[in-house]
């Protein structure tokens, strides 16, 4: 078994990239090839790296058949694209449709579900995995707490990387009450489990 040796990344600010529609299946469809390739290099050079943005941009270039230089930037950074990110995004969009989101939330809203990208798995298990949680705080703030070891899930202080906004942002907000919040956390967990080789987090049912 091969383990992708990645460092323990710094704790980030974990904010969404402005102007990007994370719920769209091709959020970088309007960007030009050179712009995408340059952006990938920048996103991979930060600590922590913006692997979600870099992967989404790489997949857009691959769809166009223009991904060679972008692939070289990943190799130079010692990183890999997240192989299941697009399929996971399609999965959650298919399950959490506008009708579902509009009709199946009850009670007072204001909490959030979130997904954190993590590493530390063998290549046979997909190298990257995901942690699913819910919180009354912002997803970025809760991710930072996990990385700092504050009420953190196992492995996230060392192996956590960043929130995967494309897998949850459009679902929020969810019910504030604990039972309702945990129900949506469980639903998201169960939606991702068939697609992502390793999904961790609490399941309510």
Image (tube, rainbow, N blue to C red):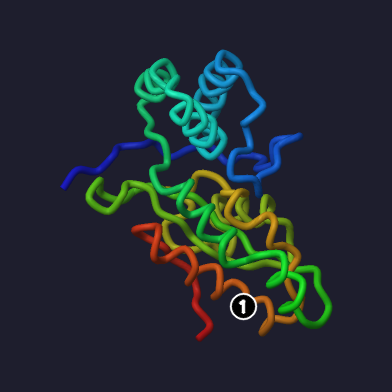
Residue 138, compared with residue 65, is above or below; it is below
- Which image quadrant for residue 182? bottom right
Total number of numbered discs in the rendering: 1
Q: Residue furthest front?
A: 64
Residue 95 visible in the snapshot: yes
x and y percentages locating residue 8 in the rendered image: 43, 40
Horizontal side, residue 41 vs residue 194: left or right: right
- Which image quadrant for residue 2? top left
Q: Which residue does the image show at 35% across and 23% down from the upper left? A: 75
Residue at mark 1: 182
Q: Which residue does the image show at 56% across and 57% down from the upper left? A: 115
Horizontal side, residue 169 vs residue 102: left or right: left
x and y percentages locating residue 5 in the rendered image: 30, 37
Residue 204, compared with residue 163, is above or below; it is below
Q: Which residue does the image show at 72% across and 62% down from the upper left? A: 172
x and y percentages locating residue 77 in the rendered image: 40, 23
Residue 48 visible in the snapshot: no
Residue 181, compared with residue 81, is above or below; it is below
**Which residue occupies the foreground of this view, 66 or 69?**
66
Say which element carries label 1: helix
Q: Which residue does the image show at 53% across and 23% down from the upper left? A: 40
**Which residue occupies the foreground of this view, 158 or 57?**
57
Q: Residue furthest right?
A: 108
Q: For the residue carrying disc 1, how many other residues have a C-alpha within 10 Å: few (<14), some (14-19), or many (20+)?
A: many
Horizontal side, residue 74 vs residue 23: left or right: left
């Amino acid at each position: 078994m091969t383990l992708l040796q990645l460092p323990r990344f710094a704790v980030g600010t974990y904010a969404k990239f402005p102007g990007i529609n994370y719920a769209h299946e091709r959020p970088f469809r309007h960007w030009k090839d050179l712009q995408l390739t340059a952006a990938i290099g920048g996103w991979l050079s930060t600590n922590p790296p913006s692997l979600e943005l870099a992967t989404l941009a790489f997949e857009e270039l691959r769809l166009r058949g223009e991904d060679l230089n972008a692939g070289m930037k990943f190799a130079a950074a010692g990183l890999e694209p997240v192989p299941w990110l697009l399929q996971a995004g399609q999965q959650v969009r298919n399950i959490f449709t506008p009708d579902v989101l509009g009709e199946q939330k009850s009670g007072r809203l204001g909490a959030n579900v979130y997904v954190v990208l993590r590493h530390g798995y063998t290549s046979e298990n997909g190298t990257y995995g995901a942690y699913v949680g819910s919180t009354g705080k912002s997803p970025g703030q809760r991710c930072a707490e996990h990385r700092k070891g504050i009420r953190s899930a196992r492995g996230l202080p060392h192996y956590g990387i960043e929130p995967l906004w494309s897998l949850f942002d459009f679902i929020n907000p969810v019910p504030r009450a604990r039972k309702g919040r945990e129900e949506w956390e469980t639903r998201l967990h169960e939606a991702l489990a068939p697609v992502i080789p390793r999904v961790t987090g609490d399941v309510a049912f």
